[in-house]
Every structure is written in C-alpha cells, then in structure tokens.
Image (cartoon, rainbow, N blue to C red):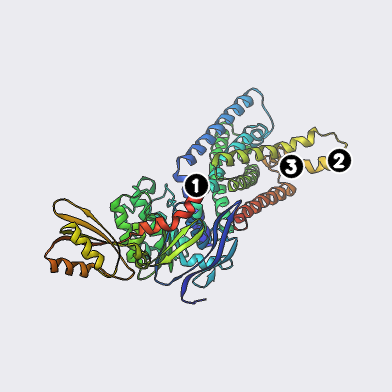
Amino acid sequence: MNDNAMIAVTDLTKRYAGRTAVAGISFTVARGEIVGLLGPNGAGKSTTMRILSCFLPATSGTVRVSGFDVFRQSEEVRRRIGYMPENNPLYPEMRVQEYLKFRARLKGLNWRRSRERLGTVMEQCGLTEVGRRIIGQLSKGYKQRVGLADALVHEPELIILDEPTLGLDPHQIRAVRQLIKSLAQKHTVLISTHILPEAEMTCNRMLIMFDGKILAADTPDNLQRLMAGGSQIIAEIAAPADELREALSQMPGIEQFNVSPCEGEFQRCALTPRDGYDLRPAIFALALERGWIMRELTRSRHSLEDIYVQVTKPTEEEDGE
Amino acid sequence: MRIFWTLARRELGAFFCSITGYVIIAAVMFLIGLSFVVLMTNLGSDPSPMPVTEMFYRTYFFWLIVLLATPALTMRLFALEKFSGTFETLMTTPVSDLQVVAAKFASALVFYIVMWLPMLACLFVVRHFTNQTCALDAGTVGGMYLGVFLVGGLFLSLGCFASALTRSQMAAAMISFVLGVSLFSVGFLAEALPVATQWQSQVLSYFGLFEQMHNFARGMVDTRAVIFYVSLTFFFLFLTLRVVESRRWK
C-alpha cells in the first residue's frame, strides 16, 4: 500500500443488525487532497466517516489513517484527525472560548499551546467577537463555525467533516466553503455532502456513493468528461431551415442534429458531436461562409447533477420496488 | 490524568452551570429542612438519648433523598451525550473509555457531596439552641458523612450504569431508580425470610443498607459494610465501562 496515502480503505464492510450500510468499499486519499464523499441520504457516507474516526468498528476490511490502523491503533489515529459529525453536536451550556479550550486540552494540547491555537482558530473561523457568548444562544452559522474550529484546533493531519453546510443560509455556506478551501494547503480534507455544487466547488476529487458502494471516483472535471459523449452544441442561426439542414448533414463530426424554428428567422440547432469532436469552429466557419447571422453558439455541458442522477438512478428504482 | 481533570471539570461545570443542578440542590435542601422540622417536633415532645444524626437516619427521609436525587444526578451523564451526539465528538478525541467513565462518576460524586453540605447547618442549629455537644461530635459527623459518601457512591455508580445503557434520560432515571429501590429493599427481605434458610439470610443481611447506614450515623464504621459498598460501586463502574466499550464490539 502507498505510504503516502492519508487514508487507505480496503474492502470496508459495515453491517448493522439486518442491514448492510457499507458494502466492501475501497479507496485511498492522498495527503493534501480535498475529497468529497457524495451520495444521497442513507448511502453510507456517515457510517464510513464514523469508522474512519474510530467511533464505530468495521465489520470487515481494513482502514488505515496515516499508516495507523483505526481499530488497533485507534488512539494514534484519533490524535491525527479532526472530526465534525453530522448536525455538529456541541455543549450548549458552554461558552465558545471555554468549549474550544476544553476540546484542545482533550486533544492533548498543553496549556500554552491550547491558548495559542485558540486564538488562531477563532480568527480563522471568524469567532473572535463571539468568544464569550454561550454556544446555545449562537446562530446556526456560528455554531457550525465553532464545530469547524473544534475540528481544526489541534492542527490535525486529516479533517473529516460530515455535511458541514447542512442547514446554513447561502452566505454562510459560501463562507464555510471558503474556509474549507483555505485548509487545503496544510491538511487533507474529507467532506461528505449530498449537495452537488458543494462538492464541485470545493473538492479535488469526488467519490460517489450509493447504497453502501462507491459507484464513481474521479475529479469533477473527469467525471464531466466521462459524460461528454452526451453533451450538446446549441447554435442559433438566422437561415432558411432547408439550407441549414443540408449544410449540417454534410458536416463531418455530427452524429445527430435537430433544427427547430426559433423567433423571427432564427433556427435553433441542437447538435450532438461524435466523440472528441469540437463542432464550434466548424459551425462558426459555416455561418461566416454563407453570410448567416449567428447569435448563439454554446456547448451545454452535462452538469454533475446529471452524472449524479444517472449514476445513482438504477439502484434507486430497484429500491422503490 | 490531565485529560481526567479536563473532563471532570467540564462535567462539574455542566452540573453547576445548568438549572437542573440548582433545582436538585434546592429540592434536597427542602427535603433536609422538612425532615429536620419533623425531627425537631418529635424531639420536643419526646426527649431521646440518641444523637441527632442517628435520629435523622432512623427516618426514611434520608433514603428518599438518596433514591430520588441520585437518578436525577446521573441520568444526564451518558444518555444526554448520546442523545445530542456529543458522545461522538467526545469519543473521537484521544481519550480512553476509562477516563470518561471515571471523570463522569467523580464529578457526580463531588456534586453529590456538595449537595449534602447544607445538612451541617441543621446540626449547627441544634447545637446552638440545645447545648447538646454530641450533635456535632467529630466521630458521629465523620461517620455520617462517610456513610453518605459510600451510599452515594454506590447509587451513583448504579446511575452511571443505567445512563450508559440508553439514549433517553427519562429511561436512564427510571432504570437507576428501579435498581436503587430494589437494592434498598433486598435488605428488608432478609428480615422477612424465615430463619431456616440460614446462608441466604446471611447473604441478604449484607445488603441491609438501612441498618448499615444506621451504624454509620451512630459513628460506628463497620469495615464489612465499607468493603461491601466500595466493591459494589466498583462493580457497577466496571459494568458501565463495559457498556461504554461495547460500541466497539457490537
């Protein structure tokens, strides 16, 4: 196994009484990566994270974090991770500063170091003004930041965040994402989410999980390219429909096209290219040659949402039966 | 050890920063005061040679307080953390299960002792108004507090165990109440049994919490009783530890 891997999961299975939550998954995460664990609710993301953070034992398979086994060398692993569980549980009766200090001490930081780190993470997470407030009275956004600060306070090698933006408003989501991105240089981050744009924006790599299995694992760009065969070129050209059809049918690289009238003289062409072809220069050249007016030329890329739906769909239907 | 102190301090903070802590203290003070009034009126009509502390333990007030207060103290310890999810954040830090159990139990015990301190005031009152020096005799007061401490330890460890079993504070309180009441009643079973079954009544007599506490209150420390309480306390703490560990092999 690769020594450089921060997380190495091999054949991990977790069964609860009568239900398999995680069914034999394997993946590795290299140091410094931000990896998104993506999947609908109940796909096994949280279970995987709980096993990684040594809270639950695996039924079978091995999990290594920074080379340490999560079961046999649990304490070493726990020293190296910062884990924020789903729903971000906190002690509501404590003050922000007091809580973070308590957590820092629990994680083995000495008095001086914990005070130092306290200042750093509070600034990093924008908590300086609320340091003396009681956690139970903070807004959801602030609470989330307290949870993040807690995960960061001992400078862990690996940060595991389970749905860090759950229930936040768009501004807060943006702030949290910024924060996660800024962690990339120093830490390895594993975040789970069921919101696609989130993974798309923050992660170097995504693991799409469904029903306890990993269905796809790649960079967001590669996942999109994987689906590029299905992408379309949209062009709106002012030209007689027949001439346009004829010209398009002679053009190489077009697998399929569809011309429909738009307002005025314009025709809307939806073109499906053969694999690897970029049709846009050819279309432009065609319009130029014939003197047609063109007002739009775009490539509609498959969003990750399409990929996600496509990958997770078949099993979902089985599930419904 | 450092982690133990950190954990224990937070637990104590949770007792003293929350309204429940003060409600429990207030309720216990009320019951102590009530029993004191009852005691005084009885004493006024019928003089008695017994020390005041002993009189107090001859009433059922003491047991009522212990049986009601300990589940209220301990129900939160594990159940609330499991319910709110903080158990997960707690157990994913490099702390050992033993440290967690020990810190929670110790903080509950400290709170429990603080809860009994107002009773000293009652004894001062007696001494001040009656010139009865034996009310505050070091031996009897020491014995009494040792008894209170040992009984408390046992019932709190029961409560810890009950709280570790469930996510619901209500269920935890009920389980520890039922366990506590049954443990308390076993002692009376010994008296009720016919004498013929000798070894059984002998075993049961060790569970005579009521009688043992009575002895403590007289200032009489019986090592058998001390060993009985301490070992049973450790037994229930051991069970608690097992329950906390169980998530690793379940």
Front residue of A136 and A247: A247
Q: Which residue is labeled 3 in the image?
A: B207
Count residues near mark 1 (Cα–Cα under 10 Å), then give few for <14, some for 14-19, many for 20+.
Answer: few
Q: Is residue A284 above or below residue A270?
A: below
Q: Which residue is labeled 1 in the image?
A: A320
Which of the numbered marks, if any, corresponds to residue B198?
2
Q: Is residue A242 above or below residue A169?
A: below
Q: CA distance from mark 2 to mark 1?
A: 66 Å
Spot the residue most to the left.
Answer: A291
Determine whether the residue tagged by mark 1 lies in a helix, strand or loop. helix
Q: Residue at x 59, y 34 (%)?
A: B131
Q: CA distance from mark 3 to mark 2?
A: 15 Å
Front residue of A293 and B238: A293
Front residue of B134 and B170: B170
Relative to A160, B205 lies left or right:
right
Q: Amino acid at mark 2?
A: Gln
Count residues near mark 2 (Cα–Cα under 10 Å), then give few for <14, some for 14-19, many for 20+.
Answer: few
